[in-house]
Image (tube, helix red, strand yellow):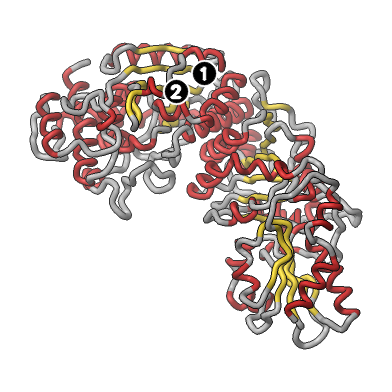
């Protein structure tokens, strides 16, 4: 380590400690221990352009151990990547660019929102998969326009979380050689030494997954760290995993190697001792020697030249391969919403009964040529989820061009990977499983919503209609669970036309993930359904007289019950309005005028019908309304039997409406 490098590393340590101390909140242990490894990567290997955080061929850096955010912010500041010293001083304060955990879209050069441990590793795998896919499509022997690395930085906690094992198992199988993981192995968690919970041989586990493993015994040995990264980059047949053995809280005598340095400020006196131990020349906080700034700036300027070189190469590529330039532009632009809206083929529906999962599969294959960058897959349930792109090929280590991804039984990693692919860009991706298994995916779906990523989630087998598989496979509370996530559209269509509307919503969404909740069983096509489903709720059957006696609101397969109940009630002189509400979120986003048109305040007699729990329906039915919903788990029996047993019958809907009239 040269003198200037030592000063730069210590600048990262001191800035991190100062920021955390000023905020009186944060995690100093990781930045102090891991600063040499992170600085070595930023200085010598990470390709970025400080003028342009969105340069396409930059290397991606994901701090999976997001609690160590002060490390990343200090590096971004030193290398002129958008953060000022005032931003560092503003660490963890309201509205600052330096929140407690890195947030994508909030802070420039932050590639992913991280903090939930292990999630960043799954997203890194997704980025590496997207990179491999696009490289296989666009690279030519004389032009490698997609040619960079994905670096993920993790700690012990990331490797304990199951999502990382799921993701790495798939990454090894896919031989993603552009993925390099750096493991800050300090053997400390909040509760103490990892030996109390985490004693396996991590390197052997990674080898079993199919990774090259490299170990750096001394986390302060920058030369050894450099050699390890070079060895990882030289491996062209598998991803690499670099273990860097560090001491948490390095340089702080009272805290070094101790759990107490993990998640709390060092304390004023200990920060002073840190300065002495490191030989830091200034006692005043947030002061960095000019030579450090000059050194890092020069490195950044040199790195920025690579963007200019790439831009020149890309221009030549476009001139030589104009057809690829057209395809590139299509991959990297939004779906043409008007084209879809006005396409008769896209909206075409059969009159025959069909499961909405089957219609969904039809839609995927209708748009596969119109949207060539549509790519997706299922958690080993493709034939049931109906998500296979015909003639799309299989995404595999042998063929990264393939558009069908086989995720295996790995729902949580699948959703993290989907986020990574969406963050990478250039692809429009979807993932699928049975709706009940959204339980495994919820944490990563929450991140989709938080990062405003338009991932499409295809959930089939949406209710007790699953039938004989029984309550373990029958989702009852899951609609309520997903509807509780901000910035997530949950869309449960009633028939084919509404299913197409759901896919239109998903394909044209720019900042919101969409969950399509689809039936296993065949359902009747509703002669009243329309594109109005795009508004989230609409009047399916209007009352015959000036004012309805009541309103039945239904979703999904239960809309057919509502229609039949309406017809029977009308025979008895009871005139009710029927509203289909495939998406509460889309309806809530409409104007007050429209919402009053569909659900007028003065019509207080309302019944909601849905084969899920009643949670969330109160705001639509009010104090005078009732629900025909689930209040228990399901059972093992044929679907028709279950719907009858649990009250989803025309007779029960009629009686429930009569009971409040």
Residue drawn 33% across and 44% down?
100
Residue drawn at point x = 81 percent, y = 45 percent: 467
Residue matched to label 2: 181
Of the pair 337 and 423, the residue shown nearer to us: 423
In front of the other: 534 or 562: 562
Q: CA distance from mark 1 to mark 2?
A: 8 Å
**Spot occupied by residue 270 in the image (x, y as percentages of width and height):** 14, 33
Where does label 1 land, which residue?
239
| Label 2: few (<14), some (14–19) or many (≥20) C-alpha neighbours in 10 Å | many
What is the residue that sits farthest to the bottom in this orientation?
546
Image x and y of residue 535, in percent: 67, 65
When the figure is inspected, residue 13 is found, relative to residue 617, above or below; the finding is: above
Give the left or right position of residue 223, taking residue 408 as reference. left
Q: Is residue 68 above or below residue 345?
A: above
Residue 16 percent across, percent down from the top left:
24, 36
Q: Confirm whether residue 235 shows in the render.
A: yes
Quarter assignment of residue 27: top left
Residue 404 lies in what quarter of the image?
Answer: top right
Q: Earlier in the sequence, mark 1 or mark 2?
A: 2
- The answer to whether the residues at label 1 and label 2 have Cβ atoms under 8 Å apart is yes
Snapshot quadrant of residue 194: top left
Disc 1, SS: loop
| SS label for mark 2 | strand
The quadrant in which the N terminus is found is: top left
């Amino acid at each position: 380590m040269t003198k200037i490098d030592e000063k730069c590393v210590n600048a990262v340590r001191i800035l991190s400690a100062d920021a955390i101390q000023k905020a009186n909140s944060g995690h100093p242990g990781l930045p102090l221990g891991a600063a040499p490894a992170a600085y070595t990567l930023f200085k010598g290997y990470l390709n970025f352009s400080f003028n342009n955080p969105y340069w396409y061929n930059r290397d991606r850096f994901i701090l999976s151990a997001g609690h160590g955010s002060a490390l990343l912010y200090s590096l971004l500041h030193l290398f002129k990547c958008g953060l000022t010293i005032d931003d560092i001083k503003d660490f963890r304060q309201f509205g600052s660019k330096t929140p407690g955990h890195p947030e994508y879209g909030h802070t420039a050069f932050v590639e992913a929102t991280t903090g939930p441990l292990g999630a960043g590793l799954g997203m890194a795998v997704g980025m590496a998969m997207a990179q491999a896919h696009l490289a296989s499509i666009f690279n030519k022997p004389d032009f490698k326009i997609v040619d960079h690395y994905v670096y993920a930085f993790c700690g012990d906690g990331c490797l304990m979380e199951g999502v990382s094992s799921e993701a790495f198992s798939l990454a090894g199988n896919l031989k993603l050689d552009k993925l390099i993981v750096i493991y800050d192995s300090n053997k400390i968690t909040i509760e103490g030494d990892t030996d109390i919970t985490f004693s396996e041989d991590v390197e052997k586990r990674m080898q079993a997954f199919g990774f090259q493993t490299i170990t750096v015994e001394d986390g302060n040995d920058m030369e050894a760290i450099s050699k390890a990264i070079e060895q990882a980059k030289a491996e062209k047949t598998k991803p690499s995993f670099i273990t860097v053995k560090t001491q948490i809280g390095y340089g702080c005598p009272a805290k070094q190697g101790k759990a107490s340095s993990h998640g709390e400020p060092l304390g004023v006196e200990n920060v002073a001792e840190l300065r002495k131990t490191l030989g830091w020349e200034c006692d005043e906080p947030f002061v960095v020697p000019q030579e450090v700034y000059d050194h890092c700036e020069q490195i950044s300027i040199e790195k920025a030249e690579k963007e200019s070189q790439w831009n020149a190469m890309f221009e030549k590529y476009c001139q030589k391969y104009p057809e690829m330039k057209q395809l590139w532009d299509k991959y990297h632009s939004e779906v043409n919403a008007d084209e879809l809206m006005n396409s008769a083929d896209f909206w075409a529906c059969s009159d025959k009964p069909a499961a909405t999962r089957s219609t969904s599969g039809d839609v995927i294959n209708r748009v596969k040529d119109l949207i060539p960058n549509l790519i997706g897959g299922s958690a080993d349930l493709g034939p049931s989820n109906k998500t296979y792109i015909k003639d799309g090929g299989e995404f595999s280590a042998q063929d990264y061009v393939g558009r069908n991804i086989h995720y295996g039984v790995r729902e949580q990693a699948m959703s993290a990977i989907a986020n990574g692919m969406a963050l990478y860009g250039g692809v429009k991706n979807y993932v699928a499983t049975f709706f009940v298994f959204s339980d495994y995916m919820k944490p990563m779906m929450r991140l989709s919503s938080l990062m405003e990523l338009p991932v499409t989630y295809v959930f089939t087998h949406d209710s007790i209609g699953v039938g004989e598989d029984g309550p373990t496979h029958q989702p009852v509370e899951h609609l309520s669970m997903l509807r509780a996530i901000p910035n997530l559209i949950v869309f449960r269509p009633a028939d084919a036309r509404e299913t197409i509307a759901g896919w239109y919503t998903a394909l044209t969404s720019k900042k919101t993930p969409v969950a399509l909740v689809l039936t296993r069983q065949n359902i009747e096509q509703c002669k009243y359904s329309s594109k109005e489903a795009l508004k989230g709720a609409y009047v399916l059957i209007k009352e015959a007289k000036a004012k309805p006696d009541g309103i039945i609101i239904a979703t999904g397969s239960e809309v057919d019950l509502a229609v039949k109940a309406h017809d029977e009630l009308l025979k008895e002189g009871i005139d009710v309005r029927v509203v289909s509400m495939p998406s509460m979120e889309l309806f809530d986003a409409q104007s007050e005028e429209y919402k009053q048109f569909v659900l007028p305040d003065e019509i207080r007699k309302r019944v909601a019908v849905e084969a899920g729990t009643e949670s969330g329906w109160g705001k639509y039915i009010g104090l005078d309304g009732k629900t025909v919903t689930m209040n228990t788990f399901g059972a093992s029996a044929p679907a028709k039997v279950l719907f009858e047993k649990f009250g989803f019958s025309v007779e029960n809907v009629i009686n429930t409406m009569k009971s409040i009239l």
